[in-house]
Amino acid sequence: MGNNLRMEKKQQIQALTQLGWSDRAISHKTGIYRGTVSKYRKIFQNQPKVPIDLPPNDPENRPKVPTELPRLPRTNSTQIQPYRERIRTWVRQHLTAQRIYQDLVEEHGYTGSYDAVKRYARKLRKKGVRGFTDRLEHVPGREAQVDFGKATCRIRFGDKWKRVWFFKMTLPCSKHAYEELVERQDLETFLRCHERAFAFFGGVPEIVTIDNLKAGVIEASIFDPILNETYLKFASHWGFAANPCMPFRPEHKGVVERDVSYTKHNALDGRKFDSLTEANAYLRHWNKRWARTRIHGTTRCQVWKLFCDIERDRLRPVAEQPFVFFTVCSRKVDVNGCVEVKRGFYRVPPRLVGETVVVHYNQQYVRIYSEGQLAIAHMRLERKGAVSDAPECLPKWKHPNLESQERYYCRQAQAISPALRKLVYDILCTDDPLAIRRVRGILSVSKKFTPEVVDTAARNALPFSPVRLIKFRALCEKYAEDPDHTTDNPRLTQNHELIRSLSEYESLITERII
């Protein structure tokens, strides 16, 4: 859509500028883009001073205001004559001849022809000079043109009346179109309108020509435009090619531009609806009753017949499943190896710490890409502040849970000595919150002594519960200094003067039994 405003809008901006209004205030009041307001402000402020021969108060310099309306043109149509005054009123409201004809039929029971209304409305208008435009031929099923605009009707939302957005997709070959009123102009609404339009047509065209709005184009360019990544995935899913028009060249999709104006002035001008659902139901009725049954001025054929005859069968089949919408954003990986998405934290592989990654997310999943490749995928978290972990996102030295850490310490102790492994296992089985720290200290001390010394110290430390690090270190140092002293307790022996033989014990037991 271009930024060329109608004369009444220009005059409104000029009047508010002279009152000292800011660009932001004018944009909020009129609904015009602030950049466009700034452009026209500069034009109005830098206008050349033209000398005026006559003073402002000279009666000859005052504009001549007609005191009464001009006489109505004559007509030979007996069916038009009763409605001449009403038709002039509607023409002064800038309604089209098609809209006037529709209202005469539905509201006043008019039985005449559309051509009669068109001829009489033409008499009431002034003819202007038009420039040359080239007429293009459109291949059936080749292209669809899309446009977004501000609707001219009003919708009730609670206690307020609002103007909503107007989506339009037109097939240039047959001129068959789909229209829908929507509350917002965001990316998801834009894509869902596409899907409903494809379902309405019963097929998908090869190319969709879009405007340079942010929902479809990130950066407009004549030679190399950058398209929205979500819209590209959407186009790939439905099997069409996205074709943004050149910047500030709305005539490149002139069919839908003219069709938007046709729909606004013939279906929506001056109407009010109690809900968005009611408005869209009326648009469907209007399309079926008037838009598709009209004889188009370019093709000289009925729109619906032309669509059914040559274009419907040329469209590609629709996708079996709807497109899974997602939002694209960029995030920098923090020092914890996480990216934040909607107040949830998602881990990435540690090699990406400090880098900027691309994130695709929706209500179901979060996918993180690095250099165009999928790095990791997570399920979407529901609780704010939660962290989504994945085993592949942890460094090699970090254990995923406490059980894995305990098994690791037991393996380290087993590699040194079975007795040390038993000692470590007993410590970890206690409810002491410092058990892990105590085990790490014992393993650290064990690396300073030989396996024989550690094994002896561990076997002699087992009877003590709980085993303290100070006690284990003292035992290791003691046995390291005195290798011959292998234990603090006397060992059990089978040979001693006080110990009798087993055969002697057997004879004594036998005598007592007999």
Image (spheres, grey):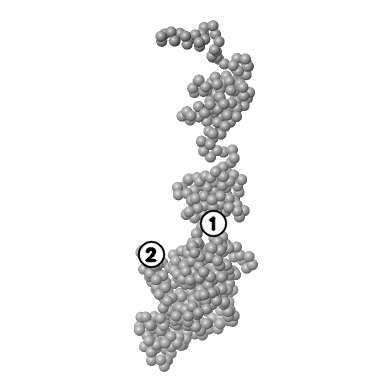
- The residue depicted at 55 percent of the width and 83 percent of the height is 129
Q: Residues within 10 Å of mark 1 (few under 14, many from 20)?
A: some
- The residue depicted at 52 percent of the width and 57 percent of the height is 327
Q: Which residue is mark 1?
A: 328
Q: Secondary structure at mark 2?
A: strand
- The residue depicted at 47 percent of the width and 46 percent of the height is 385
Quadrant for the C terminus, please: top left
Q: Which residue is mark 2?
A: 157
Task: Compare marks 2 and 1 and give the one earlier in the sequence.
Answer: 2
Query: x, y (%) of residue 322?
Result: 48, 62
Q: Secondary structure at mark 1?
A: strand
Query: x, y (%) of residue 88?
Result: 41, 84
Can residue 374 be seen at all in this image of the molecule? yes
- The residue depicted at 49 percent of the width and 23 percent of the height is 466
The amino acid beneath tag 1 is Val
Q: Nearer the viewer, residue 420 or 132?
A: 420
Q: Nearer the viewer, residue 218 or 440?
A: 440
Residue 232 - label = none
Specify the farthest residue to the top. 497
Q: Nearer the viewer, residue 308 or 45?
A: 308
Q: Determine whether, in the image, residue 96 is placed left or right of residue 419.
A: left
